[in-house]
Amino acid sequence: RAAGPGDPADQPIVVVIDDDDSVRRSLERLLRSVDLDVQTFSAAREFIDLPVPDRPACIVLDLRLPGPSGLELQESLNQARREIPIIFISGHADVPSSVRAIKAGAIDFLQKPFSDQALLDIIHRALRHDREARRERAELAAIPVCFETLTPHERDELRLVIQGRVHKQICRDLRISEKTVKFNRGRVMEKAHARAEVELPRSPDT
């Protein structure tokens, strides 16, 4: 469900996963000082089987952990389509690891030691990203479309339609022709069993 301001379901939470007790305690104090809820774990295996919090969230994740590494946890979450923004932190970062993390969707990669403000700025950005993604998923779920039947291109186009993009903007954003945009929209309507185009979100130029 969509949550509004003041709703407990909209209260952000930050998950900290680091095997260093002092780091976990320090980050927990920092985050609570700016009124953020916090969950801490010393290993990826403690978190991996838990459900993703049903509210805006992000993970502050150490690169090196006992058992599954931070990168392995990120890969597991991606494979399971558990969508939650990740901020990597590490005192032993290398370029290949940081590049791999960012390519796999990490919000950012911070080298220890880092400033409190730098981390807080990135966390707030990650939470804004997750809040927007949750809103988008809620809007998509409200549409009478079986999304499992849509191709990736059709899903991308439908998301842009929901955001109010006109055909020319969709063509530019997805780098496809207007003929393809109209064809994809027709396919989405067909799969939704729509009787009329009004049953789907309309872009302003239609």
Image (cartoon, helix red, strand yellow):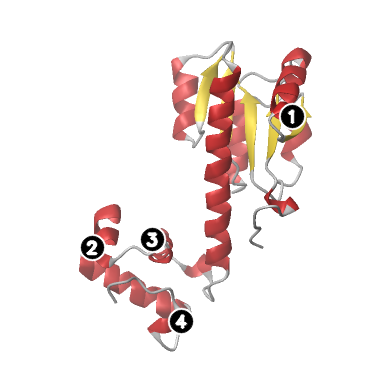
Residue type pointed to by label 4 = Glu
Circle 1: residue type: Arg
For the image shown, how many numbered marks are present on the structure? 4
Q: Is residue 168 left or right of residue 48?
A: left
Residue labelled with disc 3: 160
Q: Secondary structure at mark 4?
A: helix
User: Which dot marks residue 199?
Assistant: 4
Q: Residues within 10 Å of mark 2 (few under 14, many from 20)?
A: some
Disc 2 marks which residue? Answer: 168
- Label 2's element? helix
Q: Is residue 3 left or right of residue 203?
A: right
Q: Which mark is residue 32?
A: 1
Q: Nearer the viewer, mark 4 or mark 1?
A: 1
Q: Residue at x 47, y 27 (%)?
A: 100
Question: What is the secondary structure assignment of the residue under circle 3?
Answer: helix
96 and 59: which one is in front?
59
Q: Position of residue 111 (x, y in %)?
A: 54, 15
Q: Is residue 197 left or right of residue 167?
A: right
- State if disc 2 and disc 1 touch (CB < 8 Å): no
Say above or below: 36 vs 155.
Answer: above
> Amino acid under label 2?
Lys
Which quadrant of the figure has residue 33? Answer: top right
Report helix, strand or loop for mark 1: helix
Q: Decide which of 189, 111 is in the foreground and name it.
A: 111
- Seen from the viewer's position, the closer of residues 141 and 37 is 37
Of the residues tagged 1 and 3, which is closer to the observer? Answer: 1
